[in-house]
Image (cartoon, grey):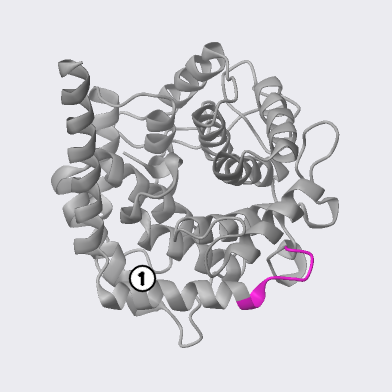
Amino acid sequence: MILGRSLAAQTLETTLRVEASGQRLITPETQKAIDQGLAYLAARQHPDGSFGSGSMYRRNVAVTSLCGMAFLSAGHTPRRGKYGQNVEQTVAFILESAEPSGYIIRPDSAAHGPMYGHGFATLFLAEAYGMTQDDKARVALKAAVELIINSQNKEGGWRYDPDGRDADISVTVCQIMALRAARNCGIAVPKATVDQCVGYVLQCQNADGGFKYQIPQQPKSAFPRSAAGVVALYCAGIYEGRDLERGIDYLERSVPEGDLLRYEPHYFYGHYYAVQAMWHTGGHHWDSWYPAIRDELISRQLPDGSWPDSLVNAEYGTAMACLILQMPNNYLPIFQR
C-alpha cells in the first residue's frame, strides 16, 4: 500500500507538472488564436457533420476527423462543452462513412490516398469512443482496426489503399497512431503488428537520422516525413534509444524561425508530427520548439481565424494549427506523455 501511494503521488506530480507547462506556454494571445480557430471551424461545418471545401477535399473523412480532434483537444466532447454538438455531429458523420468492411471512406471525396483518411478517422473515432463508450462507435472502431491490421504489407507498413501491396512512412504513421489510440481505449492490437511496423519504420531511417519516404527509394531525408517517423516510433512504444535520438537530432535542424518552412508544401503535416515528437521528448527540446512554432503560427493566422493551406484547404490548415497550439493541454490520450 505504501508503494501504491508512492506511485500515485509520482503520477499526480507528473500530471501537475505537465498541466503547469501548458498554463505557462499557452499565453492569452495563444488562447485567443485557438478560440478564433475553433470558431472558424464550427462555422464551416456542413449540415451532415462533415468538414472540408474545394473540389477534392469537400466532406473528406481525414479533414473532418482532424477538425473533430481540434475540438477534442480543447476539452469539447460529445454533448459537452461549447462545441460538444459539433463533435457529436462529426462522430455521426464518421460512423455514417464506415463501410461494413470497416473501411472509413467517402468515395466521392477520397482524394489522394484514402488510407490517410481511414487512419485519421480511426484515430478520431478511438479518441471519441474513449470518452463516450458508445456501443455503435466501438463496433465501427473494432472493424476499422481490423482493416488496418489486415492491410499491413509484408514489410510492416501501409500505403494508399488497403491492399497490402506497398508501404510508405507517411501512411504508416497514420495507421500506427490509430492503432495506439485504439489500444489505449481497450481495443486489442496484435504485438506482431506493432513490431513489424517498428521494423519498417527503422528501415526507412537514414544515416543522418532523418527518414526516407519508402524503403526502395534512394536515401533522402526530409523534415515532414522525419517528424512522422519519430512519432511512429513513439506510438509503437519506442521511448528511448539511439534511433530515436538520431531522429530528434535531425528534427532539431529545422527549429521554426519565423519563415524557415513558409513555402514547405507539407508545412502543417510536418509541424503536426514535429510538435508531438518534441512534446514526448520533453526537456529543452520541447521548451525551445513549442514557443517557436506557437509564435510562428500566431503570426500566420488570418483575420477570420483561419490558417490557409494551398494543398488541401483552410479547414485542414486551421485544424492542424489548433492541434499544434493545443499540444500542452495534454487532454487527448494519444498526445499525452
Label 1 neighbour load within 10 Å: few <14, some 14-19, many 20+: many
Q: Which residues are magenta?
A: 43-49
For image coordinates 40% across by 44% down, the residue present is 335
List the single residue furthest toward the bottom: 303
Residue with the mark numbered 1: 297
Query: x%, y% of residue 193?
Result: 56, 17
The chief SS type of the magenta part is loop
For image coordinates 51% across by 22% down, the residue present is 197
Task: Answer whether residue 46 is magenta in the image.
Answer: yes
Query: x%, y% of residue 185?
Result: 53, 31
On screen, residue 62 versus residue 322, left or right, reads right
Query: x%, y% of residue 203?
Result: 44, 22
Query: x%, y% of residue 264?
Result: 43, 62
Task: Answer whether residue 195 is magenta in the image.
Answer: no
Snapshot quadrant of residue 247 = top left
On screen, residue 156 versus residue 105, left or right, reads left
Q: Identify which residue, 218 or 299, lies in the foreground.
A: 299
- Quadrant containing the N terminus is top left
- From this viewpoint, is residue 295 visible? yes
What amino acid is at disc 1?
A: Leu
- Quadrant containing the C terminus is top left
List the single residue furthest toward the top: 192
Dot 1: what SS? Answer: helix
- From this viewpoint, is residue 211 visible? no
On screen, residue 219 versus residue 18, left or right, reads right
For image coordinates 58% across by 72% down, the residue present is 41
